[in-house]
């Protein structure tokens, strides 16, 4: 099976959350591990990999539809990572700067890793910026966009020589 849609019970069915913690017998039941498409969303005692959101929707769809998350210039105004603060989460996506690296609003120097506890897979990342001195490994540059395409639970980018400057927007395609 490559696709499934499940809809919560309702009305006279007391188990309105039929997938998840303690819902198999409404008041007294327990639920083991819930794995969908190879991803564990409930490990028998706690949600993980975005399961608190994914498993409690009114309609669960597998595979998870792709979503676009955009960090605008106003989101980026709040990003200052370096020696003292190394991690920032915006709209469910976390950026972590490596030791010795720096991310100051619109410029990155060092290695930054994007990850998420809300979304399981990154499909594409487009960073609108000035042309970099060097294009990070696994990335491409065209027009005014530094682009990564693939399928991964986290994505790293290491600047080569000079900082990546003039960052005005980052668009993530995630599942």
Image: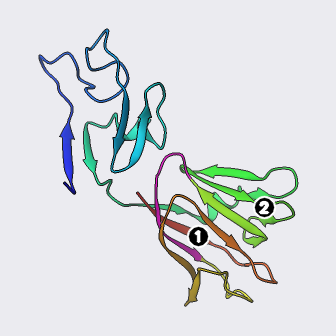
x and y percentages locating residue 75 in the rendered image: 62, 58
- What residue is shown with label 2? 98
From this view, report whether residue 17 is shown above or below residue 61.
above
Q: Secondary structure at mark 2?
A: loop
**Residue 121 belongs to the span the image colors magenta:** yes
Mark 1 is surrounded, within 10 Å at the Cα level, by few (under 14), some (14 to 19) or many (20 or more) other residues, namely some
Q: How is the image coloured?
A: rainbow
Q: Earlier in the sequence, mark 2 or mark 1?
A: 2
Mark 2 is surrounded, within 10 Å at the Cα level, by few (under 14), some (14 to 19) or many (20 or more) other residues, namely some
C-alpha gap between disc 2 and disc 1: 21 Å
Which part of the image, by quadrant, shows the C terminus?
A: bottom left
The residue lying toward the viewer, choosing from 128 and 34, is: 34
Q: Secondary structure at mark 1?
A: strand
x and y percentages locating residue 60 in the rendered image: 26, 42
The part of the chain drawn in magenta is: 116-127
Quick check: 154 left or right of 80?
A: left
Quick check: 42 left or right of 76?
A: left
x and y percentages locating residue 36 in the rendered image: 33, 45
For image coordinates 82% across by 65% down, the residue present is: 101
For image coordinates 34% across by 33% down, the residue present is: 56
The residue lying toward the viewer, choosing from 68 and 18, is: 18
Location of residue 135 by image quarter: bottom right
Q: Which mark is residue 169?
A: 1
Residue 95 seen:
yes
């Amino acid at each position: 099976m490559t696709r499934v849609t499940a809809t919560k019970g309702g009305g006279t069915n007391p188990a309105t959350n039929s997938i998840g913690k303690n819902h198999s017998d409404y008041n007294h039941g327990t639920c083991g591990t819930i794995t969908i498409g190879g991803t564990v969303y409930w490990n028998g005692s706690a949600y993980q990999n975005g399961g608190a959101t994914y498993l409690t929707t009114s309609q669960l769809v597998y595979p998870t539809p792709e979503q676009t998350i955009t960090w605008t210039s106003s989101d980026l105004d709040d990003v200052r990572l370096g020696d003292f603060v190394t991690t920032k989460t915006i709209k469910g996506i976390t950026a972590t700067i490596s030791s010795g690296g720096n991310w100051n609003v619109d410029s990155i120097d060092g290695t930054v890793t994007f990850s998420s506890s809300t979304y399981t897979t990154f499909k594409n990342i487009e960073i609108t910026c000035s042309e970099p001195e060097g294009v990070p490994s696994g990335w491409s540059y065209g027009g005014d966009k530094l682009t990564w395409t693939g399928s991964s639970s986290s994505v790293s980018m290491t600047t080569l020589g000079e900082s990546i400057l003039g960052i005005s927007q980052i668009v993530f395609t995630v599942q």
